Image (cartoon, grey):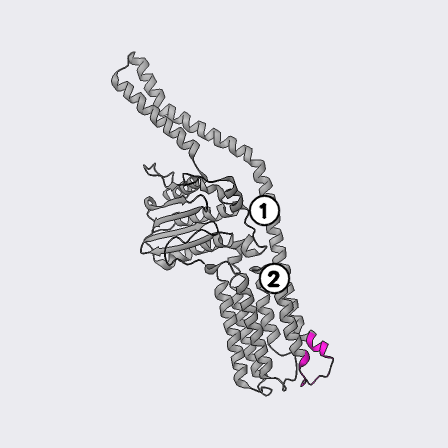
Amino acid sequence: MSALTPRTIVDARSVPLERTPQRLDPLGAQSAWLLVPLLGGLAVVYAAYSTFLHRDQLRDPAVAGVAIAVLAVAVLVASVRSHPGFAPFGRWSHFCVIAVAVTAACLFDSAVWGHNERIQDDWGQIAVALLLVVMPFYRPVGEVAGSAVVSALVLGGLAAAQHSLVIANDPLVYATVAATPVLALAAGGAGYAWTITGETLRWREVARDGQERLDGELRQAAARMIAQERMTALNAEAVPFLTGLLQRGQVTEDDVEDARNIADRLRGLSVQAVGKTWLADTLDLALGARLGGPPARQEAPRVDDPDRLERVLTTDQRAIVGALLSTVAGLPGLDPGRLTVSATDPERPTFLLRARVEEPRGEVRRALLPFVSALNSVAMDATMRQSGAELTIRFASPGAGLPYPGARRR
C-alpha cells in the first residue's frame, strides 16, 4: 500500500464547494428543511383554491386536476431530495423540480385557455415562485437565477399569448404580471442565501486567522502536556525505584528486570505521545466524556490510521467528524469497547467507523443521519448501515468505491 502523498492531501482539501448554505453550513441548512414542504404545501393548497375560483372558466377540468397532481409531484420530489437524509441537493434535482412545476403551470393555462379572464389570480406563477424561493439554500445563486429567468419567460410568454382576458392591455403587461412573482421571490431567496453564505465565509476567515495565531501557543501547550506526562510517569515509577536502589545499596537480578520493564513503559508512553493523532484524541475525548474520565488503556488501539490519512480532512470535515464521534459515544446503547475507527487506501482515503449499539434503528438514524448528510454536503461520500446492533459509518474522499455490496450513496 502506498503512503499518503502531499498531492493527495492537497487534492482532497481543494475540492471546490458551491457557494450555498447547504455546502458551507450543512448542519445549519438542515434546520431550514421544513420550509420546503411548508412552502410546497402552500403552493398546492393555493393551486387547488385558485382552480376552484376558476371553475366557471375551466375549458377542461380534468387537465386542471392533472396540473395540481403534477405540482404535488414537484413538491414531493423537492421535499424528499432536499431532506437532510439525501444531501446534497444536486443540480439535476433542482432543474427537475422547477421543470415539473412549470409544466404544471402550463397545464393549468391549457385548462383555462380561451376562457381565462385575469392573469393575476392564476396559480402557476405563484407556485413556481414559492419553490424557487427555497432553492438558493441548496443551489448556487447563478443557477437559481437561470431557472427563474427561464420560468419567467415561459410563464410570461403564455400570459402574453392569452386573448380572453377581460382587461385589455398590451401583451407585455400580461407577461410582466406573470413573470414578476417568479423573479421577485427568486431574487429574495437568492439575496438572503448570498448574505448568509457571505457571513459564513467571513466568519471562516476570522476563525482561520485566529487559529493561525493560536497554533504556536497550542504547540507549546501540547509540548508542556507531554513533558508533564513524562514527569508524572517518572515520579510514579522511576523515582521510587531509584530511591529503593540507593537505600539498599545493591542491584539484584529482579532490579534489572524491573528497570527494563520501567524503561519499556516509559518508552511506550513517549512513542504514544509523539504518535498521537487528532482522530485518536477526538475519540478518546468523546469516550472520556461518556465514561466520566479518560478511557482505560487498551492493548488494541481504538483508531487504526497508520498512514495518518486524517490529514486529508479539512477544518469543516474535522468539525463534523468530531461531532459525529461525540454523538456516537453518547448513544445510551453503545458498547464503548466496540467503538473503533479505521482508515485505509492512501490514494482515496476512506474511514470506517464501527460500533455496537443496542438501540432501535430509528433512534440511531435520527441521531446520526444529520452528520452523515453533513459530510456528504462538504465534499465527502458518506453512508451509514445498521445490521442488528452492528453500526457501520463510512466516509471517504470523493470517488472512493462503495464499502459493501448494495450500499447507496446519499
* Badge 2 amino acid: Glu
Residue beneath disc 1: 204
Indicate whether residue 34 is drawn in magenta.
no
Residue furthest toward the right?
Answer: 170
Looking at the rendered structure, the kind of residue marked 1 is: Arg
Residue 116: percent from the left, percent from the top?
Answer: 63, 84
Indicate which label's residue lies in the foreground, 2 or 1.
Answer: 2
User: Front-most of 313 and 35?
Assistant: 313
Q: For residue 1, which quarter of the picture?
A: top left
Given contact means CB atoms under 8 Å apart, are the residues at marks 2 and 1 in contact?
A: no
Position of residue 73 relative to residue 394, above or below, is below
* The C terminus, quarter of image: bottom left
261 shown above or below 95: above
Q: Mark 2 points at which residue?
A: 143
Give whichever of 407, 216 is nearer the camera.
407
Q: Is residue 171 in the magenta section?
A: yes
Where is residue 145 shown, x and y percent of the image?
63, 63
What stretch of residues is rendered in magenta? 160-175
Is 268 drawn above or below residue 10 in the view shown? above
Label 1: element kind = helix
Q: Is residue 103 left or right of residue 173?
A: left
Q: Which numbered circle lies on residue 323? A: none
Counting from the top left corner in percent of width and height, residue 222 is at 48, 32
Q: Residue at x 55, y 47 (%)?
A: 14
**Local SS, label 2:** helix
